[in-house]
Image: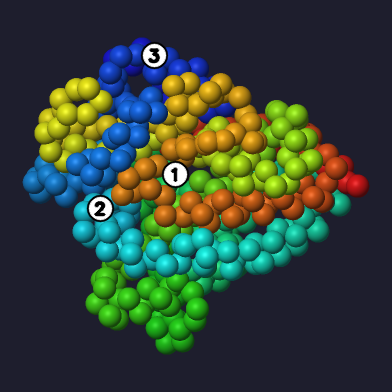
């Protein structure tokens, strides 16, 4: 058992680290709500990297799959089942690899580097409005808008839709939190997926008639070539939008919070801007935005020193792994120059985060421009944090600025 591990406690969102430390001290993989929890770096890395482990339920007979679906309360959700539960994130093997290959050219470092002028221009325009105010909420006024604009630009969606898509993504992704599922959240998630589907159908029709140099147009071409089905196209675009919104907003907030609570590191970064790529890596290690993912044992296997039957559910606690003292010296210390820094915030193995280079680009530009255009950044009020086990990050982060 997990010795009282409870991610629904009010202070867990703000400070989950003592709870993770207690889990790491327990032998084996403790059982929690049907999951065998991996909390140590070596265990999480081993499970995530092993191709015998799967994320989807296709390995199980149809009736067992339905039982698992009902047990997780993912049934009776037609749009969610069609476009979220069968997305690239939720399938394995050749089909997962095929869909990943279809979109990968748009997520290479070279391709994404071409977005840097767009990201920089958007950030500077936002700071033109915000810096003169001297005080604002970093989340609501800045971080909440940037990822949606950038991923929308890459895909080809209307910039005016970005706030709505961010909301739909949050409503969809939040239902994955095993500690916070409810009938209301279930209905909300299904509605969000349906509305997302309708918007993407419209964009698909537009790009089929008038292609552009964007991801939707490329995916329409792949569909016409028989490389993926129409439902796979919609599901893949939707999953990229889901992944590109909330997690980046969360890590931007927790990253700035780390700088605010470690002013010596902020000063170090101001003095040496070349450290920014390392600082961003440390922000992801120090407080990963996505802290929990699951895997199933795809066959009877031995891993983490124990035998497990086919179908065993594993919960991977990436945030805990990134604070493991066996993997990182002084892991609770925030160090903008930490090297090496081979963290697990982006996962590992076949399902490693496709958008990790895009998230880092957004972070590097945002914090570089914010530090360059200010002399000081200070807290300006209480910070509210997300609760539960699915995501970690501030809901609001009031700051005040002083300029040169």
Q: Quadrant of residue 24?
A: top left
Q: Compared to 6, does 90 lie above or below?
A: below
* Disc 2, SS: loop
Give percent across and percent down for residue 258.
65, 32
Residue depicted at 91% across the width and 47% down the height: 404
Is the residue 311 above or below the residue 364 in the image? above
| Residue located farthest toward the right when viewing the structure as drawn | 404
Q: Residue at x 52, y 65 (%)?
A: 110
Residue holding disc 2: 91
Residue 198 location, quadrant? bottom left
The residue carrying mark 3 is 25
| Residue 33 shows in this picture | no
Where 154 sits versus 246, above or below?
below
Q: Earlier in the sequence, mark 3 or mark 2?
A: 3
Which residue carries the number 1 mark?
Answer: 346
Q: Residues within 10 Å of mark 3 (few under 14, many from 20)?
A: few
């Amino acid at each position: 058992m997990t010795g009282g591990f409870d991610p629904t406690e009010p202070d867990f969102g703000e400070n989950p680290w003592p709870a993770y430390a207690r889990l790491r001290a327990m032998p084996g993989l403790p059982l929690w709500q049907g999951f065998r929890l991996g909390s140590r770096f070596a265990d999480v890395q081993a499970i995530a990297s092993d191709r015998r482990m799967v994320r989807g339920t296709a390995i199980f007979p149809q009736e067992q799959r339905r039982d698992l679906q009902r047990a997780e309360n993912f049934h009776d959700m037609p749009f969610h089942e069609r476009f979220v539960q069968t997305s690239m994130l939720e399938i394995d093997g050749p089909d997962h690899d095929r869909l990943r290959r279809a979109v990968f050219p748009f997520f290479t470092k070279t391709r994404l580097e071409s977005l840097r002028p767009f990201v920089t221009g958007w950030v500077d325009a936002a700071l033109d409005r915000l810096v003169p105010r001297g005080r604002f909420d970093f989340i609501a006024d800045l971080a909440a808008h940037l990822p949606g604009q950038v991923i929308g630009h890459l895909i080809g969606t209307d910039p005016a839709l970005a706030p709505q898509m961010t909301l739909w993504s949050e409503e969809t992704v939040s239902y994955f939190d095993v500690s916070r599922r409810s009938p209301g959240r279930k209905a909300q998630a299904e509605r969000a997926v349906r509305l997302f589907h309708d918007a993407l159908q419209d964009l698909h029709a537009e790009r089929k008639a008038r292609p552009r140099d964007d991801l939707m147009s490329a995916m329409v071409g792949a569909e016409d070539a028989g490389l993926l089905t129409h439902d796979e196209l919609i599901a893949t675009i939707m999953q990229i939008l889901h992944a590109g919104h909330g997690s980046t907003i969360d890590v931007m907030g927790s990253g700035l919070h780390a700088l605010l609570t470690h002013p010596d590191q902020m000063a170090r970064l101001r003095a040496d801007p070349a450290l920014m790529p390392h600082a961003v890596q440390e922000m992801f290690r120090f407080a990963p935005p996505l802290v929990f993912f699951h895997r199933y044992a795809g066959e009877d296997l031995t891993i983490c020193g124990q035998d497990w039957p086919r179908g065993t559910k594993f919960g991977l606690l990436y945030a805990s792994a990134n604070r493991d003292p066996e993997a990182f010296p002084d892991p609770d210390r925030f160090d903008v120059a930490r090297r090496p820094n081979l963290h697990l915030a982006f996962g590992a193995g076949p399902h490693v985060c496709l958008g990790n280079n895009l998230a880092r680009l957004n972070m590097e530009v945002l914090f570089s421009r914010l530090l360059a255009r200010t002399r000081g950044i200070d807290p300006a009020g209480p910070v509210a944090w997300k609760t539960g086990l699915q995501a970690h990050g501030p809901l609001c982060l009031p700051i005040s600025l002083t300029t040169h």
